[in-house]
């Protein structure tokens, strides 16, 4: 380093190397070789040298573990490969069904599975460039997450620098789970209680909340641990997921020491049952095992559906149970008017957390179990996450307990409740019901939707209470009331202007985010993207029939019906019209598809031998075509694989063009999916 004594440079490098080595021994191997006092002495010496020679500071320095300056917000990052959620299985038969599906898609291949413990934590993606940690991001909605790199650097089980004999592994992505050990969580809560601070609910929620703190100096005091479970490198072809776990260990990560390579689904089930009985022996919480096809090549062939990979499954354990008393049955109003009954319980400790509320789902569920106020009930945590009442101990029922009668009016606004045919839930149909208004505005402002900073629960509640907002369109008229807003207690001109600026900036959000933000029932972020891809403007979507919607790949009858019903509501149309006038983007920026298949809609049936369904779909879309999930008069071509089903008969009746796999390959030519 120019102008600095080479001996100083060597000293700094030596200190860093020593500290990284001792971090690995202590946090990864749990085999410390020096005392805490000796470690702190080395750290202080390095900190002093870096303060004296700031030009020597590097991103992988162990001094970054102590946290930095608080950040105001987390930038959004897009994952190179989506972080999909896993499909769940709760029985041996469901696990065997997964095996059958995999083997039907890879009929002539030998398949092995890697089984890992399913940590009850928070997923994280790490990016390394030339061996240096350059990005740490949350899962977010699976497509986009938050850049929390400064917080990630404080977690001692995450290497800031990778040491690898194979240089191709120095540019890689590592995924894993951030967790807290139970004893660390309990100790932290005891310390918070002594200090008069609020205690945390459970280890998972504590880990999630810690990662989103804006002051990384606080994060460094929390006992977070990172377990790596996936490795991806664009420079090196990886052959086995199980071997990747061993590679991750060599790179300096903690991995699941109980991971097992299984040759048969029987081995998988044995491993699942074994850990269901042994989970309490672990120092951390798990709620099942994760089963993965071991070969990355086979994983790629199997592909994914909208939300989940076809090559992986979460095999969940049976729910934990506890007995408690039901104090009251209360009704909650959701953002689309759904009325949900909730059990108010005497607090009971269950699976690592205190439960005082539980789902009762709907009127039919309450009637089926004959749940009454004052009953002693059994509470379970479904998948060890969501509490629910699953049984009543009727011999402990009070004599004066009476059957629950579902109210006829909304608990929030007093409007008449309705129950749609073939639906289990009641709805409040009053679009201006205060509770719905608040929930819709909060959803609209949500980070994954229109992302309006500062428009949280408290601010929304104030805007609705003070009659500044009765719906989401009113947000874009708030600038007209700036003077009155500034007069509100604890609302200064600067905070009001920041809110108005955030609302104005939201006008730039893309069409698919707007569709999601509208809060149409059953239309999540993934479905909104599919709709935006197929209906390039809100006007086209408004005109779509149920049949046209169902013809879209991944759109089923329930979603289609919900969309049609949404656009029949006059109030919804008025709000969309106002949002259009305000400048919200209701058209897709995507250019019109071009290619030899442009303008044609395809349906796939039967098993293809050359492609997976996902690869065939991608090839069609690369050439401008669309893929629908069901046969209708709007479909141009049916592609037929082996053992084609009823879609073939329907296509013949409608006179739809038929292609076998050979013709399909000849039509797409050298297109690579």
Image (cartoon, rainbow, N blue to C red):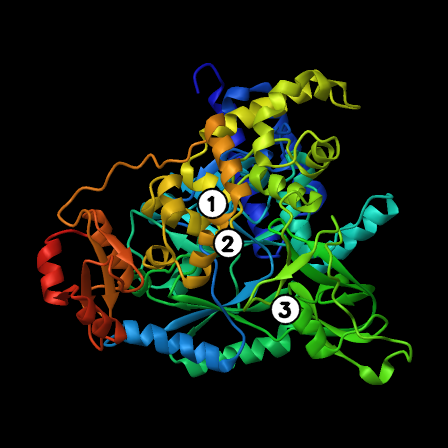
Q: Are marks 2 and 1 in contact (CB under 8 Å)?
A: yes
The percent coordinates of residue 236 (x first, y second) are 29, 51
Q: Earlier in the sequence, mark 2 or mark 3?
A: 2
Image height check: is 520 above or below 646? above
Of helix, strand and loop, which one carries label 2?
strand
The percent coordinates of residue 464 (x first, y second) are 70, 35
Distance from the alpha carbon under mark 2 to that under mark 1: 8 Å
Q: Earlier in the sequence, mark 1 or mark 3?
A: 1
Along the viewing direction, whichever of 349 and 509 lies nearer the viewer? 509
Provide the residue designation for mark 2: 176
Residue at the image position 48 percent from the left and 53 percent from the top = 565
Distance from the alpha carbon under mark 1 to that under mark 3: 30 Å
Crowding around mark 1 (Cα neighbors within 10 Å: few <14, some 14 to 19, many 20+) is many
Of helix, strand and loop, which one carries label 1?
strand
Provide the residue designation for mark 3: 382
Image height check: is 285 above or below 645? above
Residue at the image position 91 percent from the left and 80 percent from the top = 399
Image height check: is 604 above or below 539? below
Specify the quadrant that holds the N terminus: top left
Q: Earlier in the sequence, mark 2 or mark 1?
A: 1
Provide the residue designation for mark 1: 126
Crowding around mark 3 (Cα neighbors within 10 Å: few <14, some 14 to 19, many 20+) is some
Of helix, strand and loop, which one carries label 3?
strand
The percent coordinates of residue 544 (x first, y second) are 36, 50
Residue at the image position 60 percent from the left and 76 percent from the top = 276
């Amino acid at each position: 380093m120019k102008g600095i004594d080479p001996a100083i440079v060597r000293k700094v490098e030596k200190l860093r190397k020593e500290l990284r080595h001792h971090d690995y021994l202590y946090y990864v191997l749990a085999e410390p070789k020096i005392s805490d006092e000796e470690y702190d002495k080395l750290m202080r010496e390095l900190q002093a040298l870096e303060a004296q020679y700031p030009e020597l500071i590097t991103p992988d320095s162990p001094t970054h573990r102590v946290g930095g300056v608080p950040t105001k917000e987390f930038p959004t990052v897009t994952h190179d490969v989506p972080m999909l959620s896993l499909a769940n299985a709760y029985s041996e038969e469901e696990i065997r069904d997964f095996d059958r599906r995999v083997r039907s898609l890879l009929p002539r291949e030998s398949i092995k599975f890697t089984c890992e413990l399913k940590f009850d934590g928070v997923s994280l993606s790490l990016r390394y460039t030339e061996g240096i940690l350059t990005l740490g991001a949350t899962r977010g909605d699976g497509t986009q997450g938050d850049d929390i790199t400064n917080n990630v650097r404080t977690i001692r089980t995450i290497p800031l620098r990778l040491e690898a004999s194979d240089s191709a592994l120095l540019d890689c992505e590592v995924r894993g789970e951030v967790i807290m050990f139970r004893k660390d969580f309990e100790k932290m809560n005891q310390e918070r209680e002594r200090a008069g601070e609020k205690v945390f609910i459970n280890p998972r929620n504590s880990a999630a909340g810690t990662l989103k703190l804006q002051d990384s100096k606080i994060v460094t005091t929390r006992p977070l641990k990172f377990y790596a479970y996936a490795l991806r490198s664009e420079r090196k072809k990886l052959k086995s997921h199980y071997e990747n776990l061993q590679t991750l260990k060599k790179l300096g990560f903690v991995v699941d020491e109980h991971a097992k390579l299984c040759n048969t689904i029987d081995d998988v089930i044995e491993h699942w049952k074994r850990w269901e009985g042994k989970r309490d022996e672990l120092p951390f919480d798990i709620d099942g095992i994760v089963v993965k096809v071991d070969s990355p090549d086979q994983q790629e062939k199997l592909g994914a559906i909208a939300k989940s990979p076809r090559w992986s499954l979460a095999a969940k354990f049976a729910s934990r149970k506890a007995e408690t008393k039901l104090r009251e049955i209360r009704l909650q109003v959701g953002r689309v008017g759904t009325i949900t009954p909730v059990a108010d319980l005497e607090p009971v400790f269950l699976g690592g957390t205190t439960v005082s509320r539980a789902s009762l789902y709907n009127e039919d569920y309450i009637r089926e179990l004959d749940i009454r106020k004052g009953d002693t009930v059994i509470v379970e945590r479904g998948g060890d996450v969501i509490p629910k009442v699953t049984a009543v101990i009727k011999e402990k029922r009070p004599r004066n307990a009476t059957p629950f009668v579902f109210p006829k009016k909304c608990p929030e606004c007093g409007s008449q409740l309705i129950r749609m045919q073939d639906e289990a839930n009641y709805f409040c149909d009053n679009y201006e019901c205060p509770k719905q208004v608040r929930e819709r505005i909060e959803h609209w402002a949500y980070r994954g939707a229109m992302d309006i900073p500062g428009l949280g629960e408290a601010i929304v509640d104030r805007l609705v209470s003070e009659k500044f907002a009765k719906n989401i369109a009113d947000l874009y008229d708030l600038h007209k009331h700036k003077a009155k807003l500034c007069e509100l207690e604890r609302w200064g001109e600067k905070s009001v202007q920041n809110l108005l600026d955030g609302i104005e900036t939201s006008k730039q959000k893309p069409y698919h985010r707007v569709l999601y933000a509208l809060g149409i029932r059953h239309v999540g972020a993934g479905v909104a993207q599919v709709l935006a891809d197929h209906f390039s403007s809100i006007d086209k979507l408004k005109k779509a029939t149920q049949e046209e919607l169902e013809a879209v790949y991944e759109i089923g009858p329930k979603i289609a019906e919900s969309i049609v019903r949404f656009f029949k509501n006059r109030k919804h149309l008025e709000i969309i019209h106002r949002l259009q006038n305000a400048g919200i983007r209701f058209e897709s920026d995507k250019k019109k598809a071009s290619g030899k298949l442009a303008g044609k809609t395809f349906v796939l049936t039967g098993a293809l031998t050359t492609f997976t369904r996902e690869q065939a779909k991608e090839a069609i879309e690369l050439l401008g075509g669309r893929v629908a999930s069901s046969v209708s008069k709007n479909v141009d071509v049916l592609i037929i694989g082996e053992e084609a089903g009823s879609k073939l008969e329907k296509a013949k009746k409608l006179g739809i063009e038929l292609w076998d796999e050979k013709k399909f390959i000849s039509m797409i030519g050298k297109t690579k999916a």
